[in-house]
């Protein structure tokens, strides 16, 4: 009975322990679970949120929008409410002087009812002014401001593409350094195994102490290279932390698969014509042409409508409203308009040359990036064969050393060749990915 009792208590305790383990284990695992690695797209989205340069460009876009609305306001009427109070030293102000005495002004040009205006005068005026015709200058300036806004919007889109290129280049640089560290780690494991084997051979008299020392020197050189690669990886992680706003200690990156071969060059050259900054350059040409045309229209006559209403006057002059048309036309301005026309034509030419330069540079960037990508992909394929051959060579050299056919220096050289080939393979992999990203951005792609 007592044994059965203890067995039942023990079984209940085990069940309780099991329940507590099941309940708390996920909590502990969740607390110690590291942050998931970030993909290139996630790093880019974080950089978008964290970039002051893009935020400045967005404010430039807001400025362009405000300037467009100012140009729009020039086409609309202006309505003003004006109140005034005047004080005079002459109570006879407004009367007509005849000889040495004042006579009443019965009517007059102002429509008054006669009598002086007194020492004080108050009035409230509601005024309206509307431009009717100015050679469509305001309309041309409005179209130019609209072009400025569109160009600024396209520039912002291009800035996002260039930010993606910067993030991608840094992303692949970090992965390259981490891959180099992994290659050096594998090499250290190989050399440690080699030292262990040499120690056994030295005990048997089949290896010299100098061979062990040479291997140790090779290991020390490899560890120095590994530390340098780790330092470069930490530096690149700090740069990525600056872009993304994530601490370098919490920043880990996803691996990247090698992208397939390139499309034909003609496809990239065709796409580059629609690149955002090239479209912005074309829009700016049209905007400058509109401004130049608006300046030429300053020689045309202008017609404006003005109207005033008088809801209150003291003393009352019996005026309710008045309206008028004003016609103006420049006759001589000292050559001001002509000089401004010359300046505007020069700005149009400058904008056209700038757009032409951007197109040529864009095509150059595409061709250079395409050549880099094609060469990088071909190098990667060749280095794959080199790595395979270097591994086989190392295996053969290790076997022949055991047979006494080759020396330890031959084995160390085989290890160095294999390690260098593996490192060059990783370098070509990530260099190709970075060049391919630059090619896509040069052609105006990648970022949706």
Image (cartoon, rainbow, N blue to C red):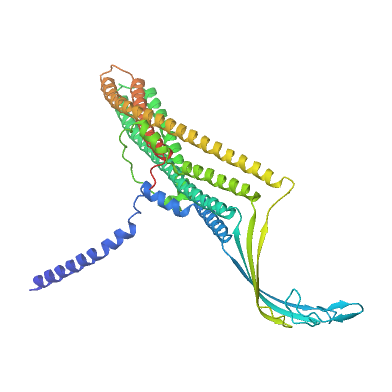
Residue 158's x, y, as percent? 46, 45
**Residue at 27% of width from left, 61% of height from top?**
26
The answer to whether residue 124 is above or below residue 241 is below
Residue 442: quadrant of the picture: top left
Residue 431's x, y, as percent? 40, 34
Residue 288's x, y, as percent? 57, 45
Using residue 402 as the reference point, say whether residue 369 is left or right of it: right
The answer to whether residue 316 is above or below residue 284 is below
- The answer to whether residue 180 is visible is no
Total numbered labels placed on residues in the image: 0
- Quarter in which the N terminus is drawn: bottom left
Residue reaching furthest top?
Answer: 405
Residue reaching furthest left?
Answer: 1
Closer to the camera, 89 or 347?
89
- The answer to whether residue 130 is visible is yes
The answer to whether residue 268 is above or below residue 204 is below
């Amino acid at each position: 009975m007592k044994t059965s009792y203890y067995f039942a208590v023990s079984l209940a305790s085990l069940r309780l322990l099991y329940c507590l383990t099941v309940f708390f284990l996920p909590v502990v695992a969740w607390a110690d679970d590291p942050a998931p690695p970030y993909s290139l797209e996630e790093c880019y989205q974080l950089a978008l949120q964290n970039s002051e340069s893009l935020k400045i460009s967005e404010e430039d876009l807001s400025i362009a929008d405000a300037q467009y609305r100012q140009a729009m306001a020039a086409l609309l009427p202006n309505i003003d409410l004006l109140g005034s109070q005047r004080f005079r030293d002459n109570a006879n102000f407004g009367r007509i002087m005849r000889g040495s005495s004042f006579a009443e002004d019965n009517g007059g040009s102002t429509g008054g009812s006669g009598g002086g205006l007194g020492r004080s005068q108050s009035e409230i005026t509601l005024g309206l002014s509307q431009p009717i015709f100015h050679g469509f200058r305001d309309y041309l300036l409005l179209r130019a401001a609209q072009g400025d806004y569109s160009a600024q919007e396209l520039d912002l889109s291009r800035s996002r593409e260039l930010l993606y290129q910067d993030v991608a280049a840094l992303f692949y640089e970090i992965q390259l350094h981490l891959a180099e560290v992994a290659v050096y780690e594998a090499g250290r494991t190989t050399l440690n195994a080699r030292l262990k084997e040499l120690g056994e051979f030295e005990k048997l008299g089949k290896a010299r102490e100098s061979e062990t020392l040479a291997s140790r020197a090779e290991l020390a050189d490899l560890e120095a290279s590994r530390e340098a690669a780790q330092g470069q990886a930490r530096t690149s992680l700090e740069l990525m932390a600056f872009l993304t706003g994530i601490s370098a200690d919490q920043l880990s990156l996803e691996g990247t698969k090698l992208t397939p071969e390139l499309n034909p060059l003609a496809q990239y050259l065709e796409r580059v014509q629609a690149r955002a900054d090239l479209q912005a350059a074309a829009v700016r040409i049209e905007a400058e042409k509109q401004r130049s045309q608006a300046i030429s229209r300053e020689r045309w006559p202008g017609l404006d409508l003005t109207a005033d209403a008088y809801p209150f006057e003291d003393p009352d002059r019996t005026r309710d409203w008045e309206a008028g048309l004003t016609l103006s036309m420049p006759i001589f301005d000292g050559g001001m308009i002509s000089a401004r026309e010359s300046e505007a034509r020069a700005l149009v030419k400058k904008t056209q040359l700038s757009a032409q330069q951007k197109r040529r540079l864009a095509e150059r960037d595409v061709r250079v990036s395409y050549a880099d990508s094609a060469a990088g992909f071909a190098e990667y394929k060749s280095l794959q064969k080199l790595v395979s051959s270097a591994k086989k060579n190392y295996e053969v050299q290790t076997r022949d050393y055991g047979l006494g056919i080759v020396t330890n220096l031959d084995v160390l050289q085989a290890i160095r060749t294999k390690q260098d080939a593996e490192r060059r393979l990783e370098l070509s992999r990530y260099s190709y990915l970075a060049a391919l990203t630059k090619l896509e951005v040069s052609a105006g792609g990648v970022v949706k």
